[in-house]
Amino acid sequence: MLRLRPVLSASTLSRRYATAAGPHALVFLEHRAGVIDSGSLSALTAAQQLGGQVTGLVVGAPDEVKGVVEKAKKLKGLSSVLHASSEQYAHTLPEVVSPLLEKLLSGSTPYTHVVSAHSSSAKSILPRAAARLDLPAVSDITSVEHDGSSNATTFTRPIYAGNAISTVRAPESVRVKFFTVRSTAFKASTADEGAQVEDKAIDPVEVTDPPTQHVRTDLTKSDRPDLGSASRVVSGGRALKNAETFKSTLEPLADVLGAAIGASRAAVDAGYADNSLQVGQTGKVVAPELYMAIGISGAIQHLAGMKDSKLIVAINKDPEAPIFQVADVGLVADLYEAVPELVHKLKQ
């Protein structure tokens, strides 16, 4: 009598589980005059925290893309660089650039995340591309964490002028996760001269008869450090009375400290300073090593733009001014006496 004994190979007994591909981020690298913006370098750092591959995307006019790509190839954390050149990309209009993102992210795209700085340009381009693809976008994030097991990404972002922190979770069902990065929350990625990653040219998506056109760019020229990335900032408020007093009071202090100059919204609205110098919820968000608030009361909208500074120094003659609640060092004094004396002491 024959007895048959089933023989099962190890491969028959083993179970195979499908594993989701790791994250692959596409970082939109902005640049000006051949230099990659510091905010994009912070976005690159945020993208690295996802724990997967990171591809950079450079778009621009044909005469400027090549030089920017060579710099991008040396950045730490990049796996590869894509670049598209066209005269239409000389100015990154959302209506012109977003179709390129749509093309890259349609169908079976390898990219799981799209990342950029929270700049005036990118925060128009990314949400537009996301909406066209019927996907959500998360803006101005201050932290990011990706869970490989669930393929979900969790972000935090400030709301209510920075008085609360919202935690947002993008689940696996969101096939491509768009987000913009608050640059002050992440260190800028640095160059590695020994690094050399692959670059690949991609065809631009030409837009016929775009609904908007670039007219001109007005830049405020200054020898001072850029407000958004300066390590020291001196800001003035409405108490400085007029534009002449604002300039004559703050510039000597900024000169001796090697600092950028900022302003509160009240000072900008009153015409004391240019709009590009505004710090706050509707202006620039800064986080320097030293922030000096001169004659600024400390409205909640202003605090939202500077409260992450490492050392906050406030000078105000009103001891009840809200700015003193967040200041590390506070001086209750007349700024017209205190600031000149401070400049004199610093020069000694």
Image (cartoon, helix red, strand yellow):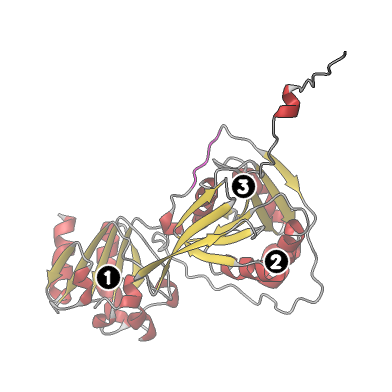
Q: Residues within 10 Å of mark 2 (few under 14, many from 20)?
A: many
Q: What span is colored magenta in the figure?
A: 189-193
Q: Are marks 1 and 3 in contact (CB under 8 Å)?
A: no
- Mark 3 or mark 2, whichever is nearer to me: 3
Q: Amino acid at mark 1?
A: Leu
- Going from N to C along the chain, the mark reached first, 1 or 3, is 3
Relative to 297, is 184 above or below?
Answer: above
Amino acid type, mark 3:
Pro
**Which element carries disc 3, helix, strand or loop?**
loop
Image location (x, y in percent) of residue 308: 33, 61
Q: Is residue 213 left or right of residue 289?
A: right
Furthest residue in direction right, as rendered: 1
Circle 1 is placed at which residue position? 250
In the image, taking residue 152 as reference, residue 333 lies left or right, namely left
Residue at 69% in and 69% down: 134
Residue at point 47%, 67% (across, down): 221
Q: Residues within 10 Å of mark 3 (few under 14, many from 20)?
A: many
Q: Residue at x 59, y 50 (%)?
A: 151
- Residue 133 spot, x, y in % from top left: 71, 67
Q: Which mark is residue 98?
A: 2
Rendered view: 164 above or below 79 = below
